[in-house]
Amino acid sequence: MRFWRIILAILRELGDENAYTRHLKIHGRANSPEEYRRFQTEHFKAKYQRAKCC
């Protein structure tokens, strides 16, 4: 059982599910399609604005 919990936790982290949950807690908002859209916009904007080194 512990193995599957670890795998599930890894998948949630890779799928940004944990990041979205943290976003909701930090901003004190409820889960909704609009809020998820806001999260994705902020998340990808921050992700792709960072310079990448060769």
Image (spheres, rainbow, N blue to C red):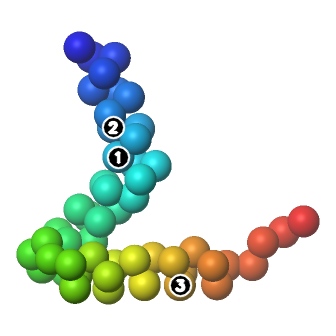
Return the disc, 3 or 2, that comes first in the chain's sequence: 2
Rendered location of residue 2, percent (x, y): 27, 17
Kindly indicate the quadrant of the structure image that contains residue 33.
bottom left
Q: Are marks 2 and 1 in contact (CB under 8 Å)?
A: yes
Residue kind at label 2, given as amino acid type = Ala
Question: Which residue occupies 34% across, 17% down?
Answer: 3
Q: Which mark is residue 9?
A: 2
Residue at the spot x=31%, y=55% of the render?
A: 18
Identify the secondary structure beneath mark 2.
helix
Give the residue drawn at x 63%, y 79%: 48
Q: Is residue 3 left or right of residue 48?
A: left
Q: Which residue is mark 1?
A: 12
Q: Is residue 22 above or below residue 4?
A: below
Give the residue number, with chain letter if any, for mark 3. Answer: 45
Identify whether 50 is placed above or below 8: below
Whole-number angstrom distance, CA of label 2 to CA of label 1: 5 Å
Q: Quadrant of the C terminus?
A: bottom right
Relative image position of residue 22 (x, y in whole percent): 26, 64
Instruction: Give left or right: position of 15 versus 54.
Output: left
Q: Is residue 3 above or below residue 43?
A: above
Q: Secondary structure at mark 3?
A: helix
Residue 27's disc is none
Q: Mark 3 belongs to which amino acid?
A: Lys
Label 3 crowd (10 A; few <14 / some 14-19 / many >=20): few
Q: CA distance from mark 1 to mark 3?
A: 20 Å
Residue 17 x/y as whole percent: 32, 56
1 relative to 38 in the view: left or right: left
Q: Toward which corner of the image does residue 10 lie, by quadrant? A: top left
Quadrant of the image containing the N terminus:
top left
Return the residue nearer the eye: 34 or 28.
34
Q: Position of residue 13 (x, y in %)?
A: 40, 48
State the residue at coordinates (84%, 69%). Answer: 53
